[in-house]
Image (spheres, rainbow, N blue to C red):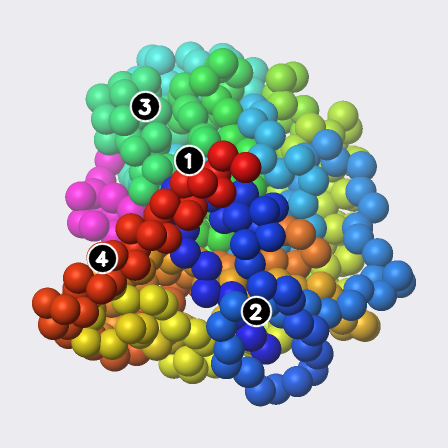
């Protein structure tokens, strides 16, 4: 298989270059072929069989992801901002997980249940609650159980007040800051629990990204999402996730409902060593929500399997070098590049190396240069960083002058092409 080495100078420029025909024609390759043909200025494509139809679902917003690679198997309006409802509690949980991991807080630390937490999120609120008593002190460990298993609004408010002093600061400073660190560029938060607030907005894609991060980064904490019940204040409550008892291998994550967002769910399951993550939102009925999530996961497990496109440390292409001893640098992926493909027939795949270049020398071995991005049937299926396989020193004065002149000419050509 071959890869197009594509240089990106500004966001969105790649699409414009493609539209103007400034890339070479693609070549076809079979997914069953184990080798990797190394070449520049080409892409990988294969035929799509008619029987390999996509998922036919009813959710207004949906996405299905393979957890290990991040490969997207299906998406529908995945980037539309919508009220995430109680699925937003996953962001609160991640902030707490991260604080524990960094040593800022401990599971044994205790936070007081304020009147605000009790009145707005506890028994008087009439919403989902862990029934924590007013003015009682509850450990971070128990508050996490209450927030995740029982979807306790009081538990989330107590965690927010304990970490930040008040819930609004926690939402704007802690949750938003952490979301941006995780690459969640669109998500905004007005509180800690997803109760109606105009600022509470997330896409199903970013909810899926968050779920994947939690699963991969906090395997011990993730087990909380699969616990089927929790008792607090002598009140036993079941986990609200219907998948836990309805689908083999289901072990998370979170349901949600508000009038603004409708019924939503982030779910995950493992079958035959493959973990899938589903996120849906905007459903009109709780039972339909559970049915849709289960149906989508079953479709994914039934129709897809993982294939390795690029082995770890395998040369995948090269990047152009500016002012170096060499005109180019070889690129490798440190981890295998894997993608989920249909079990029957071939998928249409396009893979490209995307980097900002030419890369200025000197270049260190192991330096991150860009990413290899794989599209399946027009949607990005997986993206993996690529690194310099070797060091490239600074070239002679003559070489730098020649490269400078060459870039000047190319820049003038591109500027002219922009006006076409």
Q: Is residue 399 visible?
A: yes
Q: Which sits earlier in the primary sequence, circle 3 or circle 1?
A: 3
Between disc 2 and disc 4, the foreground one is 4
- Residue at 43% of width from left, 74% of height from top? 317
Check contact, mark 1 vs mark 4: CB within 8 A: no
Residue 135, given in percent of the width and then of the height, sits at: 29, 20
Give residue 343's quadrant in the image: bottom right
Q: Nearer the viewer, residue 339 or 390?
A: 390
Tell me: 215 left or right of 358: right
Q: Quadrant of the N terminus?
A: bottom right
Q: Would you call the spot at circle 4 few (<14 residues within 10 Å), some (14-19), or many (20 or more)?
A: some
Relative depth, front residue between 346 and 101: 346
Identify the residue position indicated by label 1 in the image: 185
Residue 154 coordinates in the image, percent (x, y): 42, 24
Marks 2 and 1 sit apart, C-alpha to C-alpha, by 31 Å
Residue 227 lies, with reference to residue 134, above or below; the image says below
Q: Residues within 10 Å of mark 2 (few under 14, many from 20)?
A: many
**For residue 260, above or below residue 188:** above
Taking depth in this image into account, of 135 and 239 the one nearest to the observer is 239
On-image quarter of the C terminus: top right
Residue, disc 3: 172
First reached walking from the N terminus: tag 1 or tag 4: 1
Region in magenta: 97-112
Residue picked out by circle 4: 404
What residue would you read off at disc 2? 42
User: Which residue shows up at 58% across the image and 25% down it?
Assistant: 82
What is the C-alpha distance between the residues marked 2 and 3? Answer: 45 Å
Mark sitting earlier along the chain (2/4): 2
């Amino acid at each position: 298989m071959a890869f197009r080495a594509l240089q990106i100078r500004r966001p969105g420029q790649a699409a414009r270059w493609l539209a103007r025909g400034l890339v070479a024609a693609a070549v076809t390759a079979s997914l069953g072929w184990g080798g990797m043909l190394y070449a520049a200025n080409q892409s990988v494509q294969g035929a799509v069989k008619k029987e390999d139809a996509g998922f036919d679902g009813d959710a207004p917003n949906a996405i299905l992801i393979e957890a290990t690679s991040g490969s997207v198997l299906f998406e529908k309006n995945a980037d539309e901002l919508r009220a995430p409802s109680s699925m937003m509690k996953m962001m609160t949980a991640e902030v707490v997980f991260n604080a524990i991991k960094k040593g800022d807080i401990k599971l044994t630390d205790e936070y007081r249940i304020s009147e605000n937490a009790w009145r707005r999120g506890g028994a008087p609120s009439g919403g989902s609650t862990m029934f924590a008593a007013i003015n009682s002190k509850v450990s971070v460990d128990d508050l996490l159980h209450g927030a995740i298993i029982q979807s306790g609004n009081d538990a989330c408010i107590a965690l927010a007040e304990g970490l930040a002093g008040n819930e609004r600061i926690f939402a704007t400073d802690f949750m938003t800051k952490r979301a941006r660190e995780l690459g969640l560029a669109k998500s905004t938060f007005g509180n800690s629990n997803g109760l109606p607030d105009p600022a509470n907005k997330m896409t199903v894609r970013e909810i899926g990204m968050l779920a994947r991060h939690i699963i991969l980064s906090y395997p011990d904490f993730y087990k909380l999402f699969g616990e089927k019940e929790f008792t607090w204040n002598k009140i036993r409550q079941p986990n609200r996730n219907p998948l836990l008892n309805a689908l083999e291998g289901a072990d998370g994550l979170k349901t949600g409902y508000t009038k603004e967002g409708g019924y939503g769910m982030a779910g995950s399951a493992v079958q035959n060593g493959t973990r899938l993550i589903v996120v849906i939102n905007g459903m009109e009925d709780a039972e339909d929500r559970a049915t849709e999530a289960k149906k989508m996961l079953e479709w994914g497990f039934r129709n897809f399997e993982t294939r390795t496109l690029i082995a770890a440390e395998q040369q995948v292409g090269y990047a152009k070098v500016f002012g170096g001893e060499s005109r180019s640098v070889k690129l490798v992926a440190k981890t295998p590049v894997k993608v989920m493909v249909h079990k029957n027939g071939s998928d249409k795949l396009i893979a490209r190396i995307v980097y900002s270049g030419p890369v200025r020398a000197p270049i260190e071995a192991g330096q991150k240069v860009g990413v290899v991005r794989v599209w399946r049937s027009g949607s990005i299926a997986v993206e993996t960083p690529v690194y310099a396989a070797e060091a490239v020193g600074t070239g002679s004065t003559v070489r730098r002058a020649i490269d400078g002149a060459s870039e000047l000419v190319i820049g003038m050509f591109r500027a002219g092409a922009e006006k076409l």
